[in-house]
Image: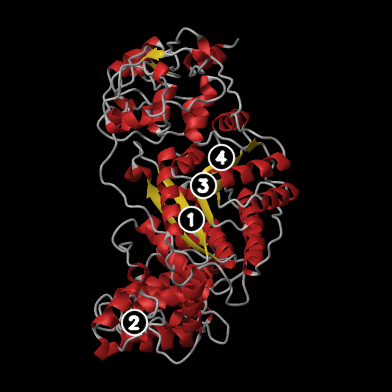
Amino acid sequence: MSPETRRKNEYGVRLVRGPFLKLQPHKDHVQGAEDFLTYTRTVRKRCGAPLAADFFSGAGGLSLGLEQAGFRVVLGADHEPFANRTHAHHFGGLSVDWDLSDPSVVAKVGDLVREAEIDLVAGGPPCQPFSRAGRSMIRYRVQSGLRDPHDERRDLWRSFLEIVDRARPKAVLMENVPDMALDREMFILRSMVEELEQMDYSVEERVVDTWRYGVPQFRQRLILVALQHNTQFRWPAETERKVTVWNAIGDLPEVEGGWRPEGGEHGWAEYSHPVTHFQREMRQGVARSDSHKVFDHITRPVREDDREAFESMTHSTKYTDLDKEHQRYRGDIFDDKYNRLNENDLSRTITAHIAKDGYWYIHPRQSRTLTVREAARLQTFPDTFRFDGPPSAAFRQIGNAVPPRLGFVIGTAIRESLDNPTDAGPSTRRSAEVLAHWMTSSGHVRALPWLQWVDGVPPSRWLVIASEELLERASAALVRQVWKLLRDNDRPWALSTAKRDAFSQNLGFILENTGREQRIKRIQTISCQAETTPGVLNGSAEEMRSKLGIAEAVANLALLATPVEAPDPTGAGAEEPILVTKGVLRVASRFQANDVDRKNRLTDGRLAVARMVGFGSYSRAAHLGLIELANSWCRPVDPVCAECPLQHHCAEGRRITERTPTLYGSD
C-alpha cells in the first residue's frame, strides 16, 4: 500500500457497520396487478379512505405523512432495494421496483392506477438538466398538447406526468428540491404546470420552509399540488414556533460513538420517557412492551482526534477555528467540514450525505455524530418506523426521505380542499393569454415601446439594451423623443461616420440638462464592443453581460424580448428567463394578493411571475405584457385599474373597484 493510499485510508470516514435489519413485508402486502386491484377494492369498501400512490417513494416518508392525513397508500415505487423493502414493511398493497424510464412500463402503471381508482398520485421525480436542443423539443411537445411518452429514458418527471395523464386522479402532489424550480427559465416547473392545466387541473406551487410545519431542521422543499375541476388548493397555516434540535432528540439516551446494543438488529438502548410534545408524538404507537426501548440508536465510531476536536467545539465553531492538529482537510475548501448542531435551534438539512459523512451532524452535547434514530427524529419519523438494511443504508433512506410531518400537513390540506371545494379562479394559461393578447394588440400607448413586436418582428437586442440604458424611469415625453431617434438609427456602428456623429449630437441635444448625459457614453462604449465583438448580441445573457458590460437584468430582458433563434413571437426553442425586475413583482403581488414584492423575491417572487406568464406559445408575449403593464397602468401609486386587462381577475383590482365604483364601475 502506498503512503498516499495509507493516508487516505487513515483519514477517511468510517462507514457505519453494524446490524443488518431485514424487514418482513406488511401483512397486507400483495404481488401482481390482479391481487392489487382486489386489494384496493377491499380497502375502499372496508374503510372508505381515499387511496394514494407514491412514486419515487423511497422509504416512505411522504407515504407515512399521507396515511397520517387519512389517505391509504396502496402503491409505492422506488428503484432502491433497501428503501423498497422498508416501504413494503410499513405499507400494504404494492411496493415495487419498476423502471419508470421505460415508456411501456409507464403506460401500464398509469392504466393500473386508473383502474384502481387512485385518488391521489404523489411523488418526487428526479429532474435532470436539459440541453437547449432538448428543451426545444420538450417545449414544442408541451405547447402542442402532445402526450407522447418521453424520449429520454432519464426524463422521469415526464413519466410522472404521463402516469397522471392516463390515471386522472382527483389530486396530484409533487415535492422536490427548490433548485428544480429556480433555474433562470424555470423550465421544468413551467412545463409541468402547463401540462397539468391542459389536463384540467388547477395548480398551486410554493417553496416551503419545512420548519414552519413542525420539522426541526432547515429544509426547503418545492411543493406542487394540482386538483381536478378547477378546485382551489388552500395552503395550510404556518407556525412561527420552531421545534428545536433538543425538543426533538433531548430524551434519547446518551451513547458512545460506535456503540452497538446486544441482540444485533433487534437490540435496543434503554429509554426513559418523552418530555416535549414533539417527543410524545414520536413515541406514539410504541408497544407497551417496548416503552423502555429505543431501536436504531447507533452511530459510527469516533476517531480519538475527532473526539478531541468535537469536545472543543460549540455550535458556532468553524472548522478553521480548530487547532491545526485537528484540521485534516484544507480549510479553504472544507471551511464547514465539521458542524456541531445547536440544541436551541433547527438542525441543518438532513441529506443522504449523512450516510457517508456525519461530520455535518455532530451531537449538540455528546462528542459523536448523530445516531440513526436521532436523524430519523429530525426528519420526523416516529420511533416505530425502522429501516431495512445496515445503518449506512438507513442513514441514506432517512436523508432521501420527505419528512412525514410535511406529508401530513400537505395531505390534510389536500383532503380539506377536496372535501370543501372552492373555485380556483383563472388558470395560469388564461391569465397569460389575456396578457399576451393585450401586449400584441394595438391601440394603447406603450410605456416601453422597445418591447413591442411590429408585424411579428421583435426589436433588435441593441435597441432593447440602448433603451434600457438611456430611458430607465424616464418621463413619457422623453421616451417618445429618444425612442424615435434610437429606432431610426438602429445598429449605429453600421452607420456612416457623418450619420453616426449626427446621431450622437441629436442624442446629446435631447438629453441635455436631464441628468442622463453620462449615459450617452455608456451606450457608445457598448456600441463599440458590439462592433468589435461580432455575434455578441446573438449570444447568451452571460456573454452579453460580460462582453458588453451591462447589468444581468438588462441582458435577460434583451434575451426575453428578442429570441434570436426564433422567427416568430412564440419563441419556441429560445431561452425565456423569468424576470423579477421592472416592477413585475408589484403586479404579481396585487394580482395574487400576497407579499412577494417585499420578501423572497428570488423564490416566491419568481414562482409568482411564472404563475402569470405560463409556458405556452403565448408566454413570451405575456411576460413582456406583464412588464409593460407594470410600467403603464399598474403603477406604484394610484394604479389605473380600469385600463388593466386583468382587472376582473386581480385581487387588488377587485378590491379597488368595489371600493370606488363611481370611478371604475363594477364587475
- Circle 4 packing at 10 Å, graded few (<14), some (14-19), many (20+), is many
Q: Which residue is mark 1?
A: 225
Q: Amino acid at mark 1?
A: Val
Q: Which residue is mark 2?
A: 633
Q: Residue furthest right?
A: 104
Q: Residue furthest front?
A: 46
Q: Amino acid at mark 3?
A: Ala
Question: What residue is shown at x 50% (from left), y 87% (from top)?
Answer: 441
Mark sitting on residue 494: none
- Circle 2 packing at 10 Å, graded few (<14), some (14-19), many (20+), is some
Under circle 3, the secondary element is loop
Q: Quadrant of the C terminus?
A: bottom left
Give the quarter of the image for residue 359. top left
Instruction: Kindly report the distance in space between the C-alpha atoms of the residues bearing marks 3 and 4.
Output: 20 Å
Specify which label sits upstream in the sequence, 2 or 4.
4
Mark sitting on residue 57: 4
Q: Amino acid at mark 2?
A: Trp
Judged left or right of residue 192, residue 551 is left
Mark sitting on residue 49: 3
* Residue 331 can be seen, yes or no: no
